[in-house]
Image: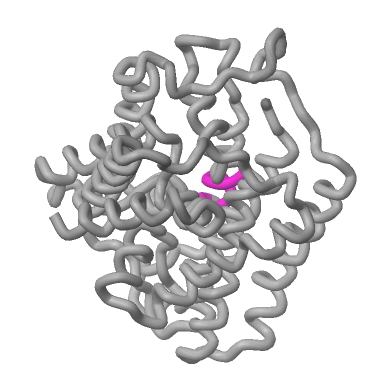
Amino acid sequence: MFTPVHTSLGALLLFQSSSGLLVHNGAVFGVSSLLSGCVFRPSRDNLPIVAGLWSSVVPVYFFVPSLIPLYPPAPNSWASVVSTLATGFLLGWGTKNGRGCTSGHMLCGLSRLSPRSFIATAIFFTTALLAANVVSRGQNIPSCPPGVPCYTPMYPSLAELVFMVGTTILTFVTNVFVIPWVLKRSENSRTIFSYLAGLQFGMGLFFSGMANPAKVLRFFAFPTDLSRFDPSLALVILFGIGPSLITFLAVKPGQKAGESKPTLADSWRLPTATVADIDWRFIAGAAGFGVAWGLRGVCPGPAVLRAILQPAWGLPEMVGYILGNLA
């Protein structure tokens, strides 16, 4: 169902966490590279963020369990295990060669006006739509209750609203006022904020509905089946990418040496690749990621959360993801 309030508040959390990581730590919030880094190159730059993502399950589970998605059944046969492994492999191979996913390219890349991220996003969105509507013939896109189109608005309960608004305000106060005043420029400070950014991002995924594969797949129903189309995730563009773009233009990170610095770091760590670095592997990787996303409605950030909540799915998916990164 269309969730304008949930998704808008979730998108604001995604914006605050990703922009906060840029402004304070000077880094880009790319979940696929962070997840791969935890496995192959663990460091204080990636482990705390992924730990924060995992931790976001706890407050949502205990305070607003209604925001935990109802996932499809976990693999219960060898065929379903192999299918999950294959999807995880394609997700890992695609994000490795496409150099990013929805967080790194779409949320952070578009807001940095990166031409390379514009190209990657266009490729994986197109292939996701094709995979959802052509490859699977729309069979993977769940329907809503009979007689109720998926674009029908649904609003939060009072408990959900209080928790989501309170979390969004607390995040804003923490990122804008507390962090600059309390923490000094140091490695320990960056580690603390990395964890907070991961925690905020994970809750943003739950609030916005991006953690829910059914909601993502219903977004891909446009324009083939409007009765199953849920426009909620378009609000991520408005309230996630839009404010991130304004922040980037205001801060101007990395524009001139010595002109500005991150709050907690000595320098900016931004991607340096350009359109000139695009090759066939980049294009094939973005397309492969799009196919995996369109078939299952899961990208790396939501996959981390689902792996915690549904370990029987997470084990073959994450094994496939790691193998895809090794290929």
How was this image coloured?
A: one colour
Left or right? Give the position of 216 relative to 79: right
Q: How many numbered badges does the structure rendering display?
A: 0
Residue drawn at x 76%, y 66% is 170
In front of the other: 173 or 307: 307
Q: Is residue 116 visible?
A: no
Across and down, in percent, residue 12 comes to 65, 51
Residue drawn at x 71%, y 8% is 147
Left or right? Give the position of 104 relative to 8: left
Left or right? Give the position of 81 relative to 24: left
Figure check: 220 above or below 40: above
**Outermost residue toward the front in this view:** 77
Figure check: 206 above or below 227: below
In front of the other: 38 or 250: 38
Across and down, in percent, residue 256 comes to 35, 71
Across and down, in percent, residue 317 comes to 35, 50
Verify whether residue 240 appears in magenta: yes
Residue drawn at x 59%, y 68% is 55
Magenta: main secondary structure equals: helix
Across and down, in percent, residue 253 comes to 42, 67
Residue drawn at x 49%, y 19% is 221
Verify whether residue 175 appears in magenta: no
Q: Which quadrant of the figure contains the N terminus? A: top right
In front of the other: 260 or 244: 244
**Outermost residue toward the right in this view:** 158
Residue 189 is drawn in which quadrant?
A: bottom right
Q: Is residue 184 visible?
A: yes
First to last magenta residue range: 239-245
Q: Which quadrant of the figure contains the C terminus? A: bottom left
Left or right? Give the position of 231 relative to 135: right
